[in-house]
Image: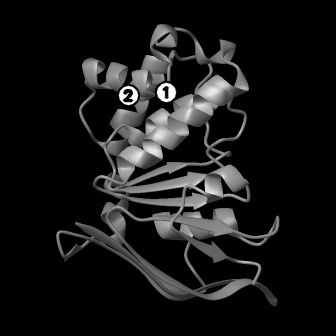
C-alpha cells in the first residue's frame, strides 16, 4: 500500500505566482489528473512530486507500507514520462533500456525488457537504432523507461503525445495495470487522458 501526500504546494518565480496552496492525497489504485491552462505549471507540479524541483511552499510526502520514502530514494519509486525526456538516438531500444537500468541502479534483464517492450508494441523494433524511430515510437519508448523498475508512483506528462490509436491503447492499459498496486498522476488537458482519472486538480482555478 502506497500513499502520496501533497500539502500546500506553491511555486513562485520572483514576484510571479505559478500556483499556490495545492493539496491532495492519493492511495494505491488512485489516478489523478493535473489540468490547467498552458503555462499554469502542470509539468512543474510533476517535477516537484518527483523531487526534481523544489517547491516554494508546502511539501510532498511518499509512503510505502506505511514507511516514509526519503527524497534521496525517490527515483527508485517514481517512474516519469515527460516531453523533455531524452533518448539516445545512436543506441537501440534495448541499449537505451540497459542505460536506464544502470542510471536507476537496477540489474538489466533482457527478458524483462522484452516483456515491457511488448506492452507498448515495440518488440519487433527492440534492436533498431532509435534515430530511425518515429515521434510516436520514441514516445512509447519513453513509457518503457518509466516502467522498467516497476515504480509504485507513475507520473505521466502528456503521455499520449504523438501516439496513434495503438499507442493510446497502450497508455490506457498501463494506467489500468498501475491501478492494481500503485498511484498514477497525469498532467494533461487532453479529455481522453483526463477521463482516465478519478479526480482532477485544476491549477488554473
Quarter-of-image position of residue 174: top left
Question: Considering only vertical position in the picture, is 76 above or below 63?
Answer: above
**Residue at which label 2 appears:** 116
Across and down, in percent, residue 140 comes to 56, 30
Q: Secondary structure at mark 2?
A: helix
Residue visible at 38% across and 28% down in the picture: 116
Q: Do the numbered discs 1 and 2 sit on residues whose CB atoms are within 8 Å? A: yes
User: Which of the labelled discs sits on residue 120, or is there none?
Assistant: 1
Left or right of 111? Residue 91 is right
| 201 vs 87, nearest the viewer | 201
Residue visible at 81% across and 90% down in the picture: 15
- Residue 87 in view here: no
The Cα–Cα distance between marks 1 and 2, rounded to whole angstroms, is 7 Å
Left or right of 41? Residue 78 is left
Across and down, in percent, residue 151 comes to 34, 50
Left or right of 37? Residue 127 is left
- Residue 91 in view here: yes
Q: Residues within 10 Å of mark 2 (few under 14, many from 20)?
A: some
Across and down, in percent, residue 34 comes to 62, 68
Q: Residues within 10 Å of mark 1 (few under 14, many from 20)?
A: many
Question: Quadrant location of the N terminus?
Answer: bottom left
Residue visible at 42% across and 27% down in the picture: 119
Question: Considering only vertical position in the picture, is 200 above or below 171?
Answer: below
Question: Quadrant location of the C terminus?
Answer: bottom right
Left or right of 59? Residue 166 is right
Residue visible at 46% across and 84% down in the picture: 59
Amino acid at each position: 500500500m502506497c500513499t502520496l501526500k501533497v500539502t500546500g504546494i506553491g511555486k513562485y518565480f520572483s514576484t510571479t505566482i505559478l500556483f499556490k496552496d495545492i493539496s491532495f492525497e492519493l492511495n494505491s489504485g488512485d489516478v489523478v489528473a493535473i489540468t490547467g491552462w498552458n503555462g499554469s505549471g502542470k509539468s512543474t507540479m510533476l517535477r516537484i512530486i518527483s523531487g526534481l524541483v523544489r517547491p516554494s511552499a508546502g511539501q510532498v510526502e511518499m509512503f510505502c507500507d506505511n514507511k516514509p520514502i526519503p527524497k534521496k530514494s525517490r527515483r527508485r519509486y517514481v517512474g516519469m514520462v515527460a516531453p523533455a525526456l531524452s533518448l539516445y538516438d545512436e543506441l537501440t531500444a534495448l541499449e537505451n533500456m540497459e542505460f536506464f537500468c544502470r542510471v536507476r541502479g537496477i540489474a538489466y534483464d533482457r527478458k524483462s525488457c522484452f516483456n515491457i517492450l511488448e506492452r507498448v508494441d515495440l518488440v519487433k523494433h527492440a534492436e533498431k537504432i532509435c534515430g530511425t524511430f518515429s515521434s510516436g515510437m520514441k514516445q512509447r519508448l519513453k513509457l518503457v523507461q518509466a516502467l522498467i523498475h516497476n515504480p509504485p508512483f507513475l507520473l505521466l506528462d502528456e503521455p499520449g503525445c504523438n501516439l496513434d490509436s495503438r499507442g493510446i491503447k497502450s497508455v490506457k492499459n498501463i494506467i489500468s495495470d498501475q491501478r492494481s498496486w500503485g498511484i498514477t498522476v497525469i498532467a494533461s488537458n487532453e479529455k481522453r487522458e483526463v477521463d482516465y482519472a478519478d479526480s482532477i486538480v485544476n491549477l488554473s482555478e
